[in-house]
Amino acid sequence: MTWGVIVFPGSNDDRDTRRVLADVMGAKVRMLWHKDTDLKGVDAIVLPGGFSYGDYLRAGAIARISPVMEEVSRFANAGGPVLGICNGFQVLCEAGLLPGALIRNSGLRFVCRDEPIEVANTATAFTASCSGGEVLRIPVKHGCGCYVLEKNRLEELEGRGGVAFRYADTAPNGSVNNIAGVCNERGNVVGLMPHPEHAVDPALGLVDGRVLFESAADWAVNGVAA
Amino acid sequence: MDFVARVYVTPKKAILDPQGKAVASSLQALGYDGVDDVRLGRYIELQLSGVAGSKAAENRVDEMCRRLLANDVIEDYRFDIEEKLEEQRA
């Protein structure tokens, strides 16, 4: 299986992601530049964390009109697994591939700490190997991670199991319904604020993020959630 | 024709505005009573040239707002458009 990691100007977790996928998990990885118009045959895509285009206008607003995003949309609409982490989640929301938006943390502070994250839906490309209600310990580090959605659309999201992850404790950012991550209807596109790529290498202490990437490997082989 | 468009983007009423809240409490701390609510938004000024007319300018700016300048999940926008007079042109 080959992973594609998108590199926007201002991405800063792109190489962390490449390192854990390639060096810790032994997968093939291709870095995809934001101006690329070809996904080079990758089987799954990660939009990494960072500050694409300086987060000018709104986080993710400018990144989502990058040339590569047209291909990412096509890939996502064809059922390919796409994971947006932190800034990548913001980009997927701005691109309309995921519902909702992320605004400034309600406490107006940048938060950086390990958080218990509950898996709320196991029928997604990145949670298929988890058990329902499983709590993963994964770091968060963001200033703009408060998930918001209007009431009627929130009910619709909850109704269809669109919440993939919730903060098991109080949300560190004021997110509605403690939402830490969401998925599209098909479950192949997932975005979350916590950073699973920082919880893979045992040398760094946490390993609970690994299961997200393992799930996607199964999904890419079987085409659907197990 | 040349126009100047002034676009105002504000958080939707139903959406939390933590920055507006912080500004409101700062104003209260400075002794300004009666500031019931503050909504913090964004002001964008666009200089447009070669537009057919004011209706065309309006349509173009509206499209720009929907496609980039505002995110309709969280923000409302409004704008006004003014034709640039000869002496205002650079």
Image (spheres, coloured by chain):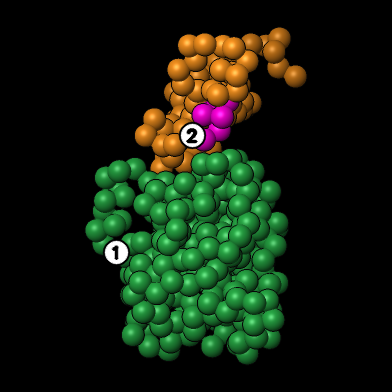
Whether callout 2 and callout 1 share a subunit is answered no
Query: Circle 1 sits in a helix, a strand or a loop, which is it?
Result: loop
Classify 10 Å Cα crowding around label 1: few (below 14), some (14-19), many (20 and above).
some
Residue shown at the point (51%, 29%) measured from the top left: B21
What residue appears at the point 55 percent right and 24 percent down from the top-left corner? Answer: B25
The orange-coloured chain is labelled B
Residue under numbered circle 1: A161
Q: Position of residue B40 (x, y in %)?
A: 54, 28
Q: Decide: marks 2, 1 in contact (CB < 8 A)?
A: no
Q: Find the magenta span and give its range.
A: B17-23
Kind of residue indicated by mark 1: Gly
Q: Which chain is green?
A: A
Q: Crowdedness of circle 2 by 10 Å Cα count: few (<14), some, many (20+)?
A: many
Q: Residue at x 30, y 48 (%)?
A: A153
- The image shows residue A51 at horizontal and vertical percentages of 66, 54
The chain that hosts pointer 1 is A
